[in-house]
Image (tube, helix red, strand yellow):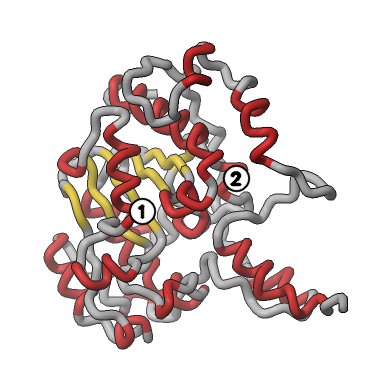
Amino acid sequence: MTQSITHYLPLLDWYNAMGADTLFSDAPRDYYQTADQSLSTLNTPKAIHNHSPYDSSLTVMPAIVTLATPTKPSPIDLSRDSAKQGRAPVKTGLARNDLGDAHPARACTTLEELRQAMKTATGCDLVKAATTTVFSGGNPKADIMLIGEAPGAEEDRTGEPFVGQSGQLLDAILATIGIDRTMVYIANIIPWRPPGNRPPTTSEIAYCLPFIERHIALVRPKIILLLGGVATKTLLRRDDGILKLRGELLPYTPLHNDDAGDTLILAMPTFHPSYIMRSPSQKSCVWKDMLILKELRARNFSI
């Protein structure tokens, strides 16, 4: 029996939370059959098609990097389309919290103060469910900052970001361009694990946004690698999904003006390692993104 549309709404919301929010065709496609054809269109030497996208012996250089034309960001009303269709609000996105200057992140002037503010925060119910606050990992003086969505079960147990299976894959991805965790700084939009690894809600993201913005302001990286759709939509405040923005260089502009510095910080969205684990055919896209990062690093992040 055909199910009603309401039966599929939770699934559609999940797709949106994972960043699959762009329609390419009205008819389904078998991407396992078309993966080889898609690879043949890449502007890379023929030898790459006979290797894994993570083969660090390859010396393929990316195309000339250009910064996308900056546009003035504006907050996204994620409940707009949902309200018109009688749907529940999407579980990812951006909204201003109601605390303003009273938010505990606002008074933090050091990373240690920010860590303590997050550990003692009471404005988000996730604090009650999580085992620990996952603050950060890596080198706080690094030029590259990686930002994911939220901790998983292993991260919640250890208090370190990206230490589970997706973290091991992230290490392998970085290693292809000669980078390890001593050369990057890692954090998440949400520092507490959502129960059952569910996507964070709009209100949870809104409460945690000042934390991650102050985190970026204190670290002052030269580039932010946004891992996945939630990190991308939250910090760039763009309607476009990760499938469309992946690999672009965009200016990062914080929602809270007191977290904005005088130096331009670049942001580049890419796929989250957990998405790559579910969709191995997308490895080549992440490989191309890593080549861009490698080239930028060689130029001291000058564009």
- Say which residue appears at 44% left-offset and 70% top-offset: 205
- Say which residue appears at 27% left-offset and 66% top-offset: 155
- Say which residue appears at 18% left-offset and 68% top-offset: 115
The disc placed on residue 234 is none
| Quadrant of the rendering where the N terminus is positioned | bottom right
Query: Is residue 46 shown above or below 170?
Result: above
Q: Which residue is mark 2?
A: 243
Query: Is residue 67 shown above or below 163?
Result: above
Query: Is residue 117 shown above or below 258?
Result: below
Mark in front: 1 vs 2:
1
Query: Is residue 192 shown above or below 139?
Result: below
Q: Secondary structure at mark 1?
A: helix
Q: Quadrant of residue 24?
A: top right
> Between marks 1 and 2, how big is the CA–CA gap?
19 Å
Q: Are marks 1 and 2 in contact (CB under 8 Å)?
A: no
Q: Is residue 261 left or right of residue 207?
A: left
Q: Which residue is mark 1?
A: 166
Q: Which of disc 2 and disc 1 is earlier in sequence?
A: 1
Please tell me how crowded label 2 is: few (under 14), some (14-19), or many (20+) other residues with Cα within 10 Å. some
The x and y percentages for residue 133 are: 23, 73
Whether residue 203 appears in this view of the structure is yes
| Quadrant of the rendering where the C terminus is positioned | top left
